[in-house]
Image: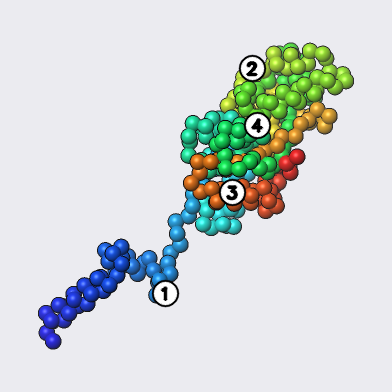
Amino acid sequence: MNRRGLALGARLVGLAIALALPSGLAACSTTELDRSAGANGQPLTSAKPVELAVFGAASLERALDAVKTAYAAAIPGVRLMIATDSSATLRTQIEQGAPDDVFLSADQKNPRTLADAGLTDGPPVDFAGNNLTIVVPADNPGGVHSPLDLARPGLRIVAAGSDVPISSYADRVVERLGALAGYPQNFVSAYTQNVVSREQNVQAVVAKIELGEGDAAIVYATDARASTEVAIIAIPDAANVSATYAGIVVAASSHRTDAHAFLDWLASPPGFAILATFGFLPPT
């Protein structure tokens, strides 16, 4: 057979194969077929990873970076896309329809608010705890040596906004300090008068202290531990409070199964072991 006959025969064979294939595959080139399926019809490449949007409290930022790496190794098919800010800000964004799959809050109140509004898939899950401490600039220009000094006239205290979880925890600490023996009756009001600024989240509070723009602040113990530019003043156990972190799966998530799997993993021993390396405590 001459070359023209061979070419015509090849085209006829190709047409016969195309007609025998399902319509979706008939339009594919040989290269596309070879790349998408092996000899037994099995995929040669893995499916595109699921991308889970995770909104996390600002105090979780460093820990979540490590969690992201560990989870990618444990579950290769899921990639965490993390954004951090004040828990209250993140809750508001979810209420307004921001695309999110998992919300990890520094308190239980914000997740419960979303659950009560029917915006979660299942109840909140407690996954970590934290304590509070006082931080001052490394050179301690305000001369803060005990919590009692927080009420000293003229001291510059940096705090967070009233809707930020650290603020409600700090307020409880101040109230408990004011009830201790040796503290003045006006301790709470004197502390409040010393607040010179209110920041968007706890990381912004720590940053102000690091820069010397305030003399003292009450923050999470984990944030104090992460900074090399602050000194720590302990809060008596009788006045300290335990912060409980809770997470939820957002009802509008398009990856609910994967979102629940991640939240369950984070609350399990492998996930908590990573949080513990950053100073987080078991939830109470």
Q: Give me the C-alpha separation between circle 2 and circle 4.
A: 26 Å
Residue 245's image quarter?
A: top right
- Residue 60 visible in the shown view: no
- Residue 135 at x, y percent in the picture: 71, 29
Up-down relation of residue 11 to residue 229 (above or below): below
The amino acid marked with disc number 4 is: Lys
Residue 117's image quarter?
A: top right
The crowding category of the residue bearing disc 3, from other C-alpha atoms within 10 Å (few below 14, some 14 to 19, many at least 20), is some
Up-down relation of residue 238 to residue 28 (above or below): above
The crowding category of the residue bearing disc 1, from other C-alpha atoms within 10 Å (few below 14, some 14 to 19, many at least 20), is few
Find disc 3 in the rendering and name its residue: 260
Q: What mark, if any, has residue 196 been given in the picture?
A: 2
Residue displayed at 71% across by 46% down: 276
Q: Earlier in the sequence, mark 2 or mark 4?
A: 4
Q: Earlier in the sequence, mark 4 or mark 3?
A: 4
Q: Earlier in the sequence, mark 1 or mark 3?
A: 1
- Residue 281 at x, y percent in the picture: 73, 42
Q: Secondary structure at mark 3?
A: helix
Q: What mark, if any, has residue 109 been given in the picture?
A: 4
User: Which label lies toward us, 2 or 3?
Assistant: 3
Q: Secondary structure at mark 2?
A: strand
Find disc 1 in the rendering and name its residue: 40
The amino acid marked with disc number 1 is: Asn
